[in-house]
Amino acid sequence: MNEKLQACLFDLDGVIVDTAKYHFKAWSRLSEELVIPFDAADNERLKGRSRVDSLEYILRKGSLVLDNDTKVKLMDRKNEWYLDQVKQMTPSELAPGVVELMDELRAAGVKVGLGSSSRNAPLILDLCGISNRFDVVVDGNSITLSKPDPEVFLKGAETLGVPPSRTVVFEDAVSGVEAAINGGFQVVGVGSSDSLSQADFVIADFEGFSMAELLSRLS
Ligand code: B16
Ligand code: MG
């Protein structure tokens, strides 16, 4: 076993699959109904944040104060619209190269886990046919604190029995990169190096990215 790499935790939305576009459509529709402006920059800020944190952000933006029951109803509606799109998902939406990397890691004895804020993670994994490829799944159903709190990744590493310093997190969101750093993990940003500059290093995508390259770029 490699000493510096004993486990990898993958974020879901934006790393394994590109569901940000579905969140964007659903939050845009809700914001439109509430007559609150919502654009791509807002959606970027919500990446990795929980459903309730996302709604609170939009309400703050519109200076709208609502009671708890109304907030729950709004979140349920947003989630219905989100699920209308998610239910059409197939394995063809998996990020190219990500499953190959996960399989390579596991074959080399590196544990592989999911660390996602999404409560819809089990459904998405199932639709994409990858539920059985993880040694642990930690998602929005089993955490109480949203990224940038490190709870989701700490729970994953603890369940795997691997210290954070020997675990690499793959993240597409600024809040997720911060969560990984806050937990003492090494972190690979997936996406743009402009916004994810806090990560140890950034890859644009997983195409052609191997375990050998990961090891060579880890400090
Ligand atoms: P849900 P990740 C996050 O997933 C998304 O990035 C974020 O946009 C979303 O609000 C959050 O999950 C909660 O999702 O409404 O499906 O429970 O990136 O942490 O995998
Ligand atoms: Mg994400």
Image (cartoon, rainbow, N blue to C red):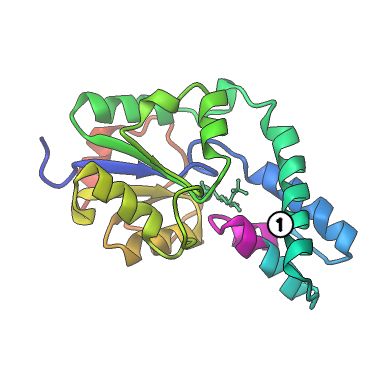
Q: Is residue 43 magenta?
A: yes
Query: The C terminus lies in which quarter of the figure?
Result: bottom left
Residue 191 seen in the figure: no
Q: Secondary structure at mark 1?
A: helix
Amino acid, disc 1: Ala
Residue 119 falls in image quadrant: top right
Question: Is residue 139 or residue 102 the one in the foreground?
Answer: 139
Q: Which residues are magenta?
A: 42-54
**Residue 112 to residue 43: above or below:** above
x, y percent for residue 46: 61, 59
Question: Is residue 30 or residue 106 the one in the foreground?
Answer: 30
User: How many discs mark residues in the rendered view?
Assistant: 1
Residue visible at 76% across and 60% down? 39
Residue visible at 33% across and 63% down? 181
Seen from this angle, which residue lies furthest front? Answer: 69
Task: Tell me if mark 1 has few (under 14), some (14-19) or many (20+) residues whose alpha carbon lies within 10 angstroms of its own.
Answer: few
Residue visible at 61% across and 22% down? 90
**Residue under circle 1?**
40
Residue 120 falls in image quadrant: top right
Residue 56 seen in the figure: yes
**Residue 132 to residue 178: above or below:** above
Query: The N terminus lies in which quarter of the figure?
Result: top left
Q: Is residue 53 magenta?
A: yes
Residue visible at 79% across and 63% down? 70
Which SS does the magenta portion mostly show?
helix
**Residue 156 to residue 199: above or below:** above
x, y percent for residue 174: 49, 61
Question: Is residue 74 or residue 47 the one in the foreground?
Answer: 74
